[in-house]
Image: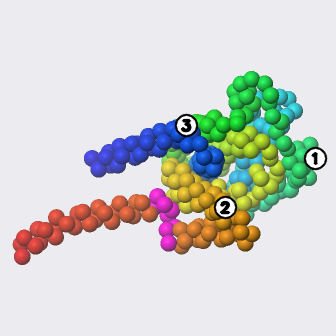
Amino acid sequence: MSSIKQHISVLRIVVALVFITVLLMPQLVSNRFILHTLFMILIWSICGVGWNVLSGSTGQMSLGHSLYFGVGAYVSTMLFMELRITPWVGIFAAAIVAGVLAFIFSRFMFKLSGFYFAIGTIALSEITFTLFMAWRYVGSARGLLIPIYRGDFKFLVAMQSNNAAPYIYTALGVLVICLIGSNYLSRSRAGYYFRAIRDEAEAAESFGIDLRKYKTIAYMYSAVFCAMAGVLYAHYAYYIDPDSVMHNRIAVQIAIVAILGGIGNLWGPIIGATVLVAVSEFARLNLGGTGQAVDLLIYAMFIIIFAVFQPHGIIGMINSIIQKFKSIKKAEPAKAVQEGED
């Protein structure tokens, strides 16, 4: 029990140090590339935490969460452009729209399971992507350029700033909210039901757990988190189109972030996003200009190496190192006693 409490206290200290570091970085670092990378880490962390609620907790492997990322971006952008509604209201509107869509889609999506569910999410994402590519009202393939707000209090009114710090602090705040919500959900009765569904769905159903109901709850939570990330990204980039916010490669990256870090673990997506985004941005900056896609090759090789040699992700690798260290530590006294007897 004491060792468990010790690990928890160490984890809290590490989390507090990381949080303080992120808070201080925009004030201490002026390099725009580093600040951009930090912001993207936070965005993908939010998406990964959301994806983990569904796929990590209930075992329903989704490869179509770009749908909700894109919906969030478009809802907030259209409200700001057409009705001059501030993105601070738009982020709540986007969350509601994403939640409602997830509820509607869940009515038929959860008739599928396993690989069929994964294929269904891909199909749903591709259909939405194609629809937005042809929908003139939302800019079709040309996309939407978010107008620059010229008044006072730009960030408070329009979520616009020439400085990266407000974006980073906002993304960090949203990530903290998502982490608190995800942690609360995992410790609630619903969270226990999620894990029962993931581990043995038929047994869970035989004990009276409504599979569709709890899968739908997880799906809605997951969609809301990704939509909020989409809103932040849209107003950071000032421009969106279906290819930048709805393409299926975004859905794949959302899944990879959580899987790389450690699927089903609260902190896994954050670790995965930190490593993955740092590697991809560094490769893109230093090797992307060669014209030979060297950055993409390194990115792909990095993912393949982890998939083959560490399928439980970075969290799993850390846990295995800790376990080996503990076993060595336990073996040393026993070896000393044996040598003394000899």
Residue marked by disc 3: 27
Q: Which mark is residue 284?
A: 2
Question: What residue occupies the far bottom of the structure in this picture?
Answer: 342
Of marks 2 and 1, the one in the foreground: 2
Classify mark 2: residues with Cα within 10 Å, few (<14), some (14-19) or many (20+).
some
106 lies above or below 154: below
Which image quadrant for residue 97?
Answer: top right
The residue sitting at 91% across, 52% down in the picture is 134
Residue type at tag 1: Arg
Question: What residue occupies the far right of the structure in this picture?
Answer: 136
Residue 153 rendering spot, x and y as whole percentages: 71, 25
The part of the chain drawn in magenta is 309-316
Classify mark 3: residues with Cα within 10 Å, few (<14), some (14-19) or many (20+).
few
The secondary structure type at the circle numbered 1 is: helix
133 lies above or below 335: above
The residue sitting at 62% across, 69% down in the picture is 298
208 lies above or below 275: above
Classify mark 1: residues with Cα within 10 Å, few (<14), some (14-19) or many (20+).
few
Which image quadrant for residue 291?
Answer: bottom right
Residue 57 rendering spot, x and y as whole percentages: 55, 52
User: Main SS type for the magenta part?
Assistant: helix
Q: Which mark is residue 272?
A: none
Give the distance between the C-alpha atoms of the residues marked 3 and 1, in whole angstroms: 42 Å
Residue 93 rendering spot, x and y as whole percentages: 74, 34
The residue sitting at 6% across, 76% down in the picture is 342
206, 131: nearer the viewer? 131
